[in-house]
Image (cartoon, rainbow, N blue to C red):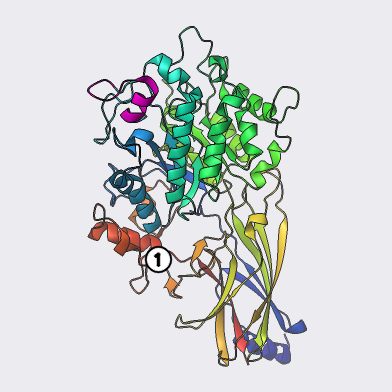
Amino acid sequence: MSSTLLSFLIASSLLNPTVNNNNTHSITGENNLSVVIPKQSSKVLTNPGIGFTELQRVVSNDPENPFYEGKPVISYPDTSTICYRWYWDQLTTAIDPNLNERMLEKKIDNVLEEAVAVNKKVVIRFMALRGKNDPIYDPDVNKDSSGIPCWLVQELYGHGLNGSSCHLSDKEAVSMFKNPLFIHRMQQFLDALGKRYDNNKTLLRIDMGMVGTWGEWNLSGYAAKTSNSVGLVDNGYTLHDLEPYIAALAHAFPHTPKTMLGTDKGDFLSYATTRGFGWRVDCLGDWSKGWSEMEDGYPGLIAHASDIQTNTAPDVLFDQRWKKSAVDFEICQDSLQDWSNIKNPLHLTYDQVQQTFDFALKEHASLIDAKSHQIPNIYQPLLTAFLNKLGYRYQLNEVDYSRNIPKNGVLTINSQWQNLGVAPSYINYPVTWRLRTANGTIIAYHTSNAKIENWLPAADYEDQSPIYKVSDHFQLGNQISKGQYFLDVGLVEKGTYNAKVLLANDTKMTTDTGQSYTITKNRNDVIKNNNSIVSYVDNDDCLYNGNVKYLSSSFLDKQSEQYIKQQNNIGRWNEIATINVI
């Protein structure tokens, strides 16, 4: 190597240092541009609205158990989403038709507060009919209630108050969803809830319940013994009978995404998806002999949704709806541990588990409700690969940028991105660039016009994802002094500079306040059965968005405060390069 070339390379490296060993940094003299190729990451990412969900609890796998929700489930993956379900009689008293403020605060409000405190989203289902023999643990609910409050039973059927039973007979339960008075009261109930909770940014989506047992659009436990099925169609219901429920939820929650349950009979699903609903199904992983959801139910449901011959309300674009509305699944049986139990008649082979996960990816799923139960060690490798595809997974492939910018000049940033998952983010987290000093002082931000919800993955989860190119022009203000600055990128919550989405890149991470962020391996990594889910170290200098002062005293103590602070201090800004203002 000549001395002249060596001198040039040394000078260039001083002027344009490699930010971090995890980036490939190419130096070019043409057009004052440098190129950074950030290193890819294979880690499981816990990001908003994707992955496994919690069921009726805030966190499963933290060994410190900060929310007092029973023994921790260490093998369960980290989660970003909580699923909660409430019956009508849990939100109104037995005698008053109005929503009860104390019940709402104690239940829904408290869950939303807990969720926002630890950077999670909530999916809610409202229901009207319990399983026939389901126990009632809620002290606010009459012990003979079937799911609707006693005052409504009195209105509908003439019993439920003055010492008479609130319990619905089989005949009453089966016919209830056609009753015009019930439909009218249901609309009032949802409207009142929507007035209070629509537009709540912690509410990820509403699941279309209110019809059938557990809000699952069947009449399990109540249908006549002579009926061929517990399905609604088998018990005399038509689409016309149930259209008001879909319309009522759409009217009550116009700004909140909604999902509709798919059933193997009826035209309810396609009717909802043509009106902007996403879709979900129960019993993922049912491989029963003879007839199963995996081999018979789901294929038939999906085919029927767009069938103009047999469906009275077909959705001819059903197989494309995932591009704008979410697809979610709930597992069959109580846990993946049930799947692995060879003594279980519904035991799944390893290949069937793989096929189950592949099916969810093929249908572009975002969330899987695995019911906050143990995950067998044998499934952990499958789970890691699955979670690295489920929902969205945004990767920054390359950044070309101006390395030297005149004071008050324009920083040109050309970036290339891919979505390596199977679905988009249904919420836009704007791509935002920022300049930061070595001591963490944030100098300036630039928010791109790029919309990541339009960054679709490959149509088939095994194919190559498309590349999205973005060109940004970062106007540097006159107040920015000459010197060297770090260039960071983050996907932020709209209207803020709080980064919310982890990228599939292995770079140096910093927090919303510009502080360096260290990832360490600690005892949690060991006891999580090598899930490739890392724990993050708290930085005492960081803020946690002031959330603690709003939390109810039921879970705010020193232990939970530390957990809350940790979750809010995760570094989600990726350090990309350095630039020089000259």
The residue sitting at 60% across, 66% down in the picture is 431
* Magenta-highlighted residues: 149-165
Q: Nearer the viewer, residue 421 or 69?
A: 69
Residue 460 percent coordinates (x, y): 70, 42
Relative vertical location of residue 76 with respect to residue 511 in this rendering, above or below: above
Residue 284 percent coordinates (x, y): 53, 31
Residue 164 lies in the magenta-colored region: yes
Which residue position is annotated with label 1?
Answer: 569
Can you see residue 220? no
Q: Nearer the viewer, residue 6 or 81?
A: 81
The residue sitting at 35% across, 42% down in the picture is 99
Residue 424 percent coordinates (x, y): 62, 51
Residue 70 percent coordinates (x, y): 27, 42
Relative vertical location of residue 160 with respect to residue 47 in this rendering, above or below: above
Residue 523 lies in the magenta-colored region: no
**Quarter of the image where one finds residue 434:** bottom right
The residue sitting at 51% across, 30% down in the picture is 282
Count of numbered marks? 1
Q: Quadrant of the C terminus?
A: bottom right
